Amino acid sequence: MLDERWVFHENAKAEPAGEGVVRRVLAYSKDLMCVENTFETGAEGKLHHHPHTQITYVVSGVFEFNIDGEIKTVKAGDTMLKLNGVEHGCVCKERGILLDIFNPMRDDFV
């Protein structure tokens, strides 16, 4: 879907991204990528880091996020910034959806 102007949700391939997590890569270019992650309660986004700046918007649910050792609980409407190289991860406390924006795009997701 590189450089596709219109990306309809039903056409975005749902792929497992860990136990209880489903990832859908949405619209993206070489410089920017939008990814939807659906989490079941108790599912984890393991601590990791990558060379991409990432903004995460909580669409729904409740999550406990660890960003660079700082832990906070976030819910629908909250946003987090993770600069490139910063370790981060989360635990889903209440089933929900996270929308991630990456700069540049994540080659490893396509």
Image: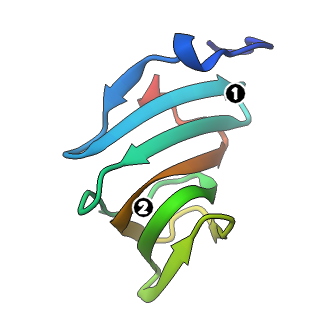
Where residue 67 sits: x, y (%)? 48, 77
Image quarter hosting the N terminus: top right
| Mark earlier in primary sequence (1, 2) | 1
Count of numbered badges drawn on the protein: 2
Question: Mark 2 belongs to which amino acid?
Answer: His
Residue 58 versus residue 66: which sits nearer the camera? 58
In contact (CB < 8 Å): disc 1 and disc 2: no
Label ID, residue 22: none
Residue 105, compared with residue 38, is above or below; it is above
> How far apart are the alpha carbons under marks 1 and 2?
19 Å
Label 1 element class: loop
Where residue 76 sits: x, y (%)? 61, 64
Label 2 element class: loop
Relative to residue 15, is residue 72 drawn left or right? Answer: right
Relative to residue 43, is residue 94 drawn left or right? Answer: right
Quarter residue 79 falls in: bottom right
Label ID, residue 49: 2
Q: How is the image coloured?
A: rainbow
Residue 24 versus residue 103: which sits nearer the camera? 24
> In this figure, which residue is indicated by the disc labeled 1?
30
Where residue 110 sits: x, y (%)? 46, 22
Point 19% across, 46% down: residue: 19
Point 65% across, 46% down: residue: 101
Question: Mark 1 belongs to which amino acid?
Answer: Lys
Where residue 66 sits: x, y (%)? 42, 78
**Residue sitting farthest toward the right:** 5
